Image (cartoon, grey):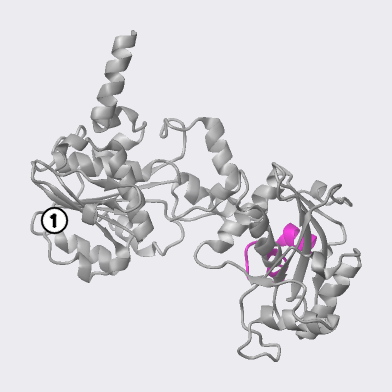
Amino acid sequence: MNDDKIRQLAEALIRDPLAFEKYRCGKGAPGFHGDRSKVKILRAGNQWGKTRAGARETLWAMLGDHPFRDTPPPPVRGRAVCYSWDQSVEIQRRINEILPRQVVEGYDFNDRRGFVNQTLRFKNGSVLEIRTAQQGTLAHGASALDFVWVDEPPPRELYSELLARLLVKRGSMWLTTTPIGRPVEWLQDEIKAGKISDHRFDLSPENCPHLSQDQIDDIAARYLPAERLQRLHGHFEGLTPDRFFEAFDEKQIRDEYPDQVCHLAIGIDHGERVGREFAVLIAWEKEADPPRVWCLDEYTNTKRTDPEDDAAGILAMLQRHDINPHEIDYAVGDINSAGKGFAGVRVNKALEAAIAHKLNRDPAPFYIRPAKKGRGSVQWGCRVLNYALKRGDLVIHPRCKNLIRSLRHWEGADDKYKHAIDALRYIITAALSGSKGYYKLRIER
């Protein structure tokens, strides 16, 4: 191909990227796009290109120029529905990437807020509204629609409301999803009943031309064993592993200390019962590439304890290494309220006060930050931990016996092994999650 042809092709791609999508969608996608069912679903892993598939299906419907099936002639009225505002903006970015701008009336897109009023008006009279599930069923009423695209499963009540919007025009719906993190049993029931046409695709170079096998292997390494079937292949169910942290290896247990000045930090999980108050002391090279972390020591309660007892245990742990409490750069603890005789007081504050009292000084030499929690935080922290183990960025001293036992045996349950994992997870996330190779482990929904 000569230079003129290459230039012409590049100019055509910029002018009308949608025209090239039928050649770029991979081996499996045409089967989904060509399905004429009233309701159909595309299930696939993260980074498969589900949202892009939903965007191209939507634009083909808006323009009445679908390469794989017949669609109603324009003008049509459609709606794209996603879970949250952030996801809405991401969907609008995906639409904008393949949108031939010359077909839009008054094109106005901003990467931070999406399209003006979250609405696209086409010169052929078609209208696309972008809405979120969090707006509730009331915001999704009234309109008679030709189609609805739902990115990630909505609540069942909203799903029923959206179906009702399609009755007058005998419209269609398509859903694109990685089925993890939300209740989807009702969706499985609809598929089993034959009410939804089901398309599931693996994350593979054949289905994802934008990814090589090496890239897919790297993506797989970032997920936990329990979530790989869902996050890589779009299955409804994950595996129940014999051990949650498959990357843990006995070679990572070494009597080794950093050979240069490092940051010192403590992660803490709180509990009254025996073995449920757990603190882990780490050193980490924050500026290194890749960063390295050493688990140096641990404290766990051998009897029912209060903050005074735990303060003594943590200070004794530091003393074993001749570490002055003022040398602790960072500490993070669970955010539950204290039952340990401190009703209504956060345990972190009570523990800080107890440390200050033991040292006969006020304030305490270090502040205990609250652990970051919320939807997806446990899986995120566990991904960071498993990936650090897999890369060899984490070394565990043999004296951390309870932590080692937990890494060997924890299966993801709320059991006796969980507390050491939580303490390490809180601090390892704070230490590594922003570093190269780790920040991508947080998978937004």
Q: Position of residue 58 (x, y in %)?
A: 23, 44
The residue most toward the top is: 2
Label 1 neighbour load within 10 Å: few <14, some 14-19, many 20+: many
Residue under the point 57% across and 59% down: 379
Which amino acid lies under the numbered mark 1 shown in the image of this protein?
A: Leu
Is 417 in the magenta? yes
Q: Position of residue 115 (x, y in %)?
A: 25, 50
Would residue 251 be seen by someone viewing this image from the given angle?
Answer: yes
Q: How many marks?
A: 1
The residue most toward the front is: 362
Q: Position of residue 368 (x, y in %)?
A: 69, 72
> Which residue is denoted by mark 1 in the rendering?
145
Task: Indicate left or right for 424 with 402 as reference.
Answer: left
Is 206 in the magenta? no
The answer to which quarter of the image holds residue 304 is bottom right
Residue under the point 68% across and 81% down: 349
Task: Indicate left or right for 101 with 177 as reference.
Answer: left
Task: Indicate left or right for 181 with 246 as reference.
Answer: left
Task: Pick the quarter of the image with the C terminus.
Answer: bottom left
Q: Is residue 285 above or below residue 18?
A: below
Q: Is residue 358 above or below residue 375?
A: below
**Part of the protein shown in magenta:** 403-421
Residue under the point 57% across and 57% down: 380
Q: Is residue 228 above or below residue 335?
A: above
Q: Nearer the viewer, residue 125 or 445?
A: 125
Q: Nearer the viewer, residue 94 or 263?
A: 263
Q: Position of residue 276 (x, y in %)?
A: 73, 76
Residue under the point 46% across and 31% down: 205
Secondary structure, mark 1, is loop
Would residue 243 be seen by someone viewing this image from the given angle?
Answer: no
Task: Pick the quarter of the image with the N terminus.
Answer: top left
Task: Indicate left or right for 278 with 96 as reference.
Answer: right
